[in-house]
Amino acid sequence: MGQNIPTNQNPKYSTSINPKYNSSINPKYNSSINPKYSSSINPKYSSSLNPKYNSSINPKYTSDLNPKYNSSINPKYSFNLHPFYGNGTRKYLFNEEGNLIGILVEANSNVYLSFNTDGEWVGYFIRAKSNFNLFNLDGEWTGQYLCSDAENGYNLFDESGEWTTNYVK
């Protein structure tokens, strides 16, 4: 993979950004960033965060948020959005061990494009207040979402509110 991760975004070089070593950004130890204990950040209990109930954050009903219909946020038409060639803002998806498993590229203030480590576009995240919901390329909500870790990153949760142990920096 041809991606150089800045040291300040790499949990292998900066333990303060790794939830394994920093309990304040680990939802197992900080209930305020855990949707199981904080309903205001859980799409299951807050309809404004749930694309099943809020059409303004659902790309099936809001074409501006859908890369299929909005070429300015589609990496097939906007070369600058590719994680290896563009120069847009990037965030990195890590697993529990701190290994890179994905790359997020900011398409605009409401959309992050999601790529695997080979640079293949695999989905996109849409802002829902402070959360971001994950959609597949067909515009279907996967049930997964990012919640802020309150320190410049996100933790990835599944539809039941369980932390996947994956996180974004």
Image: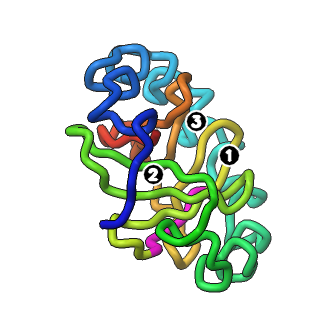
Q: Which element is circle 3 on?
A: loop
Q: What stretch is highlighted in magenta?
A: 121-125
Q: Which of the pair 169/87 is nearer the observer?
A: 87
* Residue 38 belongs to the span the image colors magenta: no
- Above or below, 8 against 75 in this view is above
* Residue 122 belongs to the span the image colors magenta: yes
Residue 135 lies left or right of residue 59; in this view the side is left
Where does the image place residue 42, in percent across and percent down from the top left? 54, 35
Q: Which element is circle 2 on?
A: strand
Q: How many residues crowd around disc 3 within 10 Å: few (fewer than 14), some, or many (20 or more)?
A: some
Residue at 61%, 69% in the rendered image = 81
Name the kind of residue labelled 2 in the image.
Answer: Gln
Q: Quadrant of residue 80?
A: bottom right
> Which residue is denoted by mark 2 in the rendering?
144
Mark 3 or 2 closer to N-term?
3
Mark 2 or 1 closer to N-term?
1
Viewer-nearest of labels 1 and 3? 1
Residue at 43%, 47% in the rendered image = 159
- Above or below, 154 against 16 in this view is below
Where does the image place residue 136, in percent across and percent down from the top left? 49, 70
Labelled pair 2, 1 in contact (Cβ < 8 Å):
no
Mark 1 or 3 closer to N-term?
3
Residue at 58%, 31% in the rendered image = 41
Name the kind of residue labelled 3 in the image.
Answer: Tyr
> Which residue is denoted by mark 3 in the rendering?
45
Q: Could you tell me how far apart the alpha carbons at marks 2 and 1 are, in whole angstroms?
A: 12 Å
Labelled pair 3, 2 in contact (Cβ < 8 Å):
no
> Which residue is denoted by mark 1 in the rendering?
128
**Image quadrant in which the N terminus is located:** bottom left
